[in-house]
Image (tube, rainbow, N blue to C red):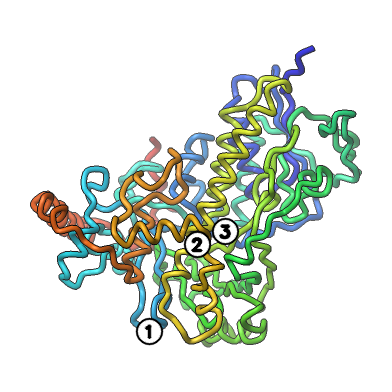
Amino acid sequence: MVRPITRVVVVGGGTAGWLAAGVIAAKHRNRIPASFTVTLVESPNTPIIGVGEGTWPTLRSTLSRIGVSETELFRQCDAAFKQGAWFGRWTTGASNDGYYHPLMYPQNFSQINLAPHWLASGDGRSFCDAVCPQGRICDDGLAPKTIATAEYEAVANYSYHLDAGKFAPFLQRHCCDKLGVRHVLADVRRVNLTETGDIRSLETEQAGEIEGDLFIDCTGFKALLIGETLGVPFKSCTDVLFCDTALAMQVPHASPTSPIASHTISTAQSAGWIWDIGLPTRRGVGHVFSSRHTSVDHAERELREYVGAAAKDLTVRRIPIRSGYRETFWKRNCVAVGLSAGFLEPLESSAIVLVEMSVKLIAEQMPVCREVMDVIAARFNATTEYRWGRIIDFLKLHYVLTKRDDSAFWRDNRLPETIPERLQNLLLLWRYQSPWYHDEFDRIEEVFPAASYQYVLYGMGFRTEVEPTIVAGNGKTAERAMRENVAQTERLRTGLPRHRDLIRKIVEQGLQQV
């Protein structure tokens, strides 16, 4: 007898849970409620962990797809624009050491690789400034669009900084009011299994038994379903990524008109780094560090020194980081999404984008019946494990390229035994061939494209041996592209508004509907 999949139960709220519920419900909207239901069960007593305030541009298409208003996102979630990240003191530790990882691709990226031409030119410009306008836009404190630009459309590519504590309730209201998601506030006391080992139902304290066909585990670090119930082991990667603790604080702006950075600021410290994220009402600042290389007290002193006098009366929240991920993400009729699937330090804001990619895959490949679920699960597991591995590679790249020798933390990060083999092979390749387009990546939907690797590599002083014939053969095309970048940079610098000014206008006037 064929067992159709018609009851999806998301366990746990927060950003992961509500994105999962929203994306699945939106994709299958025409089936709700006649033959398909999406139920989200969350405890009324569990606080949101949510310190991850950075996102990727994918969130724009995700929110648009589920019908969220971008104007309301700014009004209700204390949102700001994010155009990339600035990495300070990562290469040498000097005060003038820094580079951008912007969200715009280099000029004409699909037609020509400008990296060899920039390397050969030696004209003193940073790689980012030579091939992309976004670093200068960020330097000037400008927004990536104007009030006349429609919702979710961009002049310069962007994502968001937002208040995670406000974002989840915002998604909740949208999912329940517009997408037909059933919301149950209840504590799960027991998970009931079938004879074959599938999850049959949840026994809850306040709402009784809740049955389902497919369960999405968004219970955070607890991993109630995938870990505690189904026993899927956790695979640590602390041998590669050393940071295991974060200290976070909320810092008020000096005044209501203080400039808001439109990029994440990541400043390296003695045994980790400090994030600095600007929202309209405050800054979110935190120190991510390795407790094997420094003490909590010393890390807190570095954090307070970074913030300055404003930190005097602020409390610090301590958050453990357990770097790694589940050996299996989809087991039987249960899929882990968000922190239950794994967690890595927030260096490149990968947490929410992993949630987006996972729930998009689940929604698009929703099994029609239980009989085909294991086939889809195997495909999902292979894709998701690949993505986790590539994110670990990319995060480690920031540490491998450092020239800092001022502490054991930075020296230990360069030890060959801590560098994944795939990354070692790519670094060897990149000594002679610059990464470009999809030539060294083998999946269609990469979290970090080749352009991201270029920005980090050449921002941190990596050198690729330049083949003279390549430079000579495309010299005129490269010159035109770099000239166009200069012209585009000046157009955008004169045509874009100040970041805070645009946010104020969005809140007051709203953006044009698409």
The residue located at (65%, 78%) in the rendering is: 292
Q: Quadrant of the C terminus?
A: top left
Res. 410 visible in picture: yes
Callout 3: SS: loop
Pick whichever, 77 or 470, lies toward us.
470
The residue located at (55%, 52%) in the rendering is: 389
Q: Which of marks 3 and 2 is nearer the N terminus?
A: 3
**Residue 164 horizontal/vertical position (percent):** 60, 56
Q: Residues within 10 Å of mark 3 (few under 14, many from 20)?
A: many
The residue located at (36%, 64%) in the rendering is: 457
Callout 2: SS: helix
Amino acid marked by disc 1: Ser
User: What is the CA distance from the residue labelled 3 to the residue labelled 2?
Assistant: 24 Å
**Residue 388 horizontal/vertical position (percent):** 57, 51
Amino acid marked by disc 3: Asp
Relative to 24, say whether 346 is above or below: below
Q: Mark 3 points at which residue?
A: 163
Residues at marks 3 and 2 touching, judged by CB atoms closer than 8 Å: no
Q: Name the residue under label 1.
A: 95
Tell me the mark number nearer the camera, choosing from 3 and 1.
1
* Residue ranking furthest to the top: 1
Residues at marks 3 and 1 touching, judged by CB atoms closer than 8 Å: no
Callout 1: SS: loop
Amino acid marked by disc 2: Leu
